[in-house]
């Protein structure tokens, strides 16, 4: 029995399907086994494919993918990845590991173009069901950099962005009750003096001394008058102690 004739019109479609079985461009994935010293992560794909047997499959885990973070000009935003963090895996024209290992040009490796073995990982994105959406970490019109729960974050408010009357401000938000906002380094120990309270205490001290009664002793009263005058002159000559831009909530009131 003779073989059935080949329909040459279907060859391009069959070839396309064969190529697309292994051809990859980008995949949503979740992070696994992040290696912070090498900035590598295993990506667990989260996109299903239907093959010729019509069964749904997910690509296998992609180990050792270079993590692409925000960096340049001597600056970076550096953070670790936890298992389950969303990723976008991007497939390159060839295996990129040689460049991210040494900084040199990556040598060609046959058959790895636009495959699972040529992927890099971009951290980011978040899961939010359109039918039951969850709000993002930032308030409307704000830019937040830091912990998603706001426990340690910088909140940026550009002029007129959150509200028309906003002139531009920045909030350093911390949740720790003591020594949680440190300037200069993690060992910063000197607390900030609050100008309003310091000036109020000095004014109270001046008022208390100014209210000292006379003693009736000319020599003692002369000394008291000199002390009052000297203290008043010192208080009046004090330089401003408040910063016009930076504000803090102030000390916790004592019982």
Image (tube, rainbow, N blue to C red):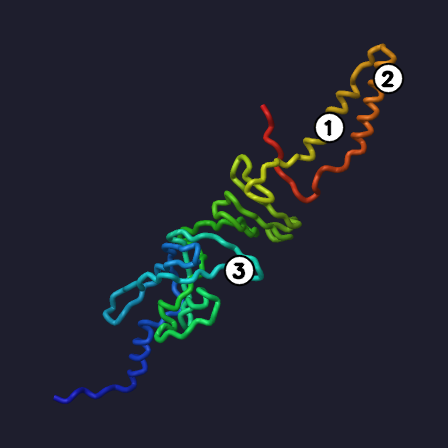
Find numbered disc 3 in the image and state the secondary structure of the residue it sits on: strand
Nearer to us of marks 3 and 1 is 3
Instruction: Answer above or below: position of 8 versus 56.
Output: below
Q: Quadrant of the C terminus?
A: top right
Tell me the quarter of the picture where residue 40 sits: bottom left
- Residue for badge 2: 222
Give the mark nearer the N terminus: 1 vs 2.
1
Q: Quadrant of the N terminus?
A: bottom left
- Answer whether labels 1 and 2 touch (C-beta < 8 Å): no
Q: Provide residue 205's location: percent of width, then percent of height.
A: 74, 24
Mark 3 highlights which residue?
71
* Disc 1: CA contacts within 10 A as few (<14), some (14-19) or many (>=20): some
| Pick the front one: 9 or 150 | 150
Q: Is residue 38 above or below residue 21?
A: above
Residue pointed to by mark 1: 202
Q: What is the secondary structure assignment of the residue under circle 2?
A: helix
Residue nearest the viewer, comparing 215 with 24: 215
Q: Give x and y (percent) for residue 36.
A: 43, 54
Measured in 3D between alpha carbons, the distance from the residue under mark 3 to the one under mark 2, in whole angstroms, is 70 Å
Residue 130 visible in the displayed image: no
Q: Residue at x 69, y 33 (%)?
A: 196
Which is more N-terminal, label 2 or label 3? 3
Q: Secondary structure at mark 1?
A: helix
- Compared to 1, does 23 lie above or below? above
Find residue 172 and report its horizontal and vertical position in percent. Answer: 58, 44
Residue drawn at 75 percent across, 21 percent down = 208
As measured in the structure, the alpha-carbon distance from the residue carrying label 1 to the one carrying label 2 is: 23 Å
Answer whether residue 94 is visible to the viewer in this image.
yes
């Amino acid at each position: 029995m003779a073989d059935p004739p080949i329909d040459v019109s279907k060859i391009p479609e069959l070839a396309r399907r064969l190529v697309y079985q292994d051809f990859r461009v980008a995949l949503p994935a979740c992070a696994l086994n992040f290696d912070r010293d090498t900035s590598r992560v295993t990506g667990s794909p989260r996109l299903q494919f239907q093959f010729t047997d019509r069964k749904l499959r997910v690509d296998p885990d992609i180990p050792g993918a270079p993590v692409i973070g925000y960096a340049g000009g001597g600056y970076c935003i550096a953070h670790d990845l936890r298992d389950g963090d969303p990723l976008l895996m991007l497939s390159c024209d060839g295996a990129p590991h040689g460049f991210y290992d040494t900084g040199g040009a990556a040598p060609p490796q046959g058959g790895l173009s636009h495959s699972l073995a040529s992927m890099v990982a971009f951290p980011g994105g978040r899961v939010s069901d359109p039918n039951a959406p969850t709000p993002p970490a930032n308030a409307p019109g704000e830019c937040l950099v830091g912990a998603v729960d706001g426990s340690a974050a910088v909140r940026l408010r550009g002029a007129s962005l959150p509200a028309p009357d906003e002139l531009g401000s920045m909030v350093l938000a911390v949740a720790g009750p003591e020594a949680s906002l440190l300037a200069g380094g993690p060992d910063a120990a000197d607390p900030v003096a609050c100008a309003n309270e310091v000036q109020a205490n000095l004014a109270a001290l001046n008022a208390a001394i100014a209210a000292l009664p006379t003693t009736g002793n000319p020599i003692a009263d002369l000394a008291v008058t000199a002390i009052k005058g000297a203290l008043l002159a010192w208080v009046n000559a004090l330089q401003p102690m408040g910063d016009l831009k930076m504000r803090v909530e102030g000390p916790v009131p004592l019982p």
